[in-house]
Image: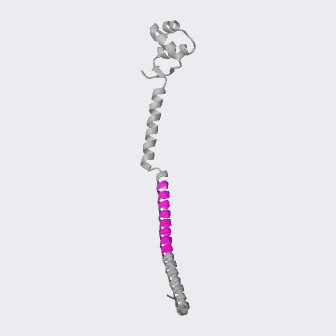
């Protein structure tokens, strides 16, 4: 069996034409696929930008404190300050002439017996007053 080579150029042209068409269609498919991928990438990029903008807005909202929370925080700070001052406030003695004079004598360094006899206080009261003065607990007097 022998090949007829008389139609060889036509056959070769047909093969090349088919290869050209196949290549063209493949490239066309690839371009379409790339266009779809580009579209997907652009959409993803847009979504990322939108998400970023929303996150920035949310963060800005979170950084701006709510007025109600600010007021409540201020009230809690004031309350804490008052409680702290009440707990750390030094003891105060009643305002009577005897205690006022006894406090003055204790600040001047008088002992309990001197204070008791001079101010007509019980010795235990005078001793307590001297100890409190020595420890810095007596700072002021208050109304009886």
Of residues 98 and 73, the one drawn nearer to the viewer in this rendering: 73
* Coloration mode: one colour
The answer to whether 3 is drawn above or below residue 119 in the figure is below
The rendered magenta stretch, by its main secondary structure, is classed as helix
Q: Residue at x 46, y 7 (%)?
A: 123
Find the residue positioned furthest to the front.
Answer: 1
Residue 72 quadrant: top left
Q: Quick check: 108 left or right of 121?
A: right
Q: Quadrant of residue 110?
A: top right
Q: Is residue 124 magenta?
A: no
Residue 104 visible in the shown view: no
Q: Is residue 27 above or below residue 69?
A: below
Inspect this view and state whether residue 124 appears: yes
Residue occupying the far bottom of the picture: 6
Total numbered labels: 0
Say whether residue 33 is magenta. yes
In the image, what residue occupies the spot 50% across and 66% down? 45
Locate residue 107: give its quadrant: top right
Tell me where residue 42 appears, x and y as whole percent.
50, 69
Q: Position of residue 46 (x, y in %)?
A: 49, 67
Name the foreground residue: 62 vs 141: 62
- Quadrant where the C terminus sits is top left
**Which residue: 47% across, 21% down?**
92
Q: What's drawn in magenta, residue-wise? A: 32-59
- Residue 132 location, x and y as percent? 50, 16
Which residue: 49% across, 70% down?
Answer: 37
Q: Nearer the viewer, residue 143 or 106?
A: 106
**Which one is nearer the viewer's eye here, 104 or 71?**
71
Q: Give the x, y percent position of residue 11.
A: 52, 89
């Amino acid at each position: 069996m022998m090949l007829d080579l008389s139609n060889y150029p036509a056959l070769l042209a047909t093969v090349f034409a088919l290869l050209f068409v196949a290549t063209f269609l493949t490239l066309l498919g690839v371009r379409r696929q790339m266009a779809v991928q580009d579209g997907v990438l652009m959409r993803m990029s847009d979504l990322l930008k939108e998400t970023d903008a929303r996150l920035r807005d949310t963060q800005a909202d979170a950084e701006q404190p709510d007025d109600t929370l600010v007021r409540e925080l201020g009230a809690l700070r004031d309350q804490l300050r008052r409680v702290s001052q009440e707990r750390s406030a030094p003891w105060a003695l009643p305002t009577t002439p005897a205690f006022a004079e006894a406090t003055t004598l204790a600040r001047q360094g008088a002992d309990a017996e001197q204070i008791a006899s001079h101010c007509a206080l019980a010795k235990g009261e005078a001793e307590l007053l001297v100890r409190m003065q020595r420890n810095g607990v007596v700072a002021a007097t208050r109304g009886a």
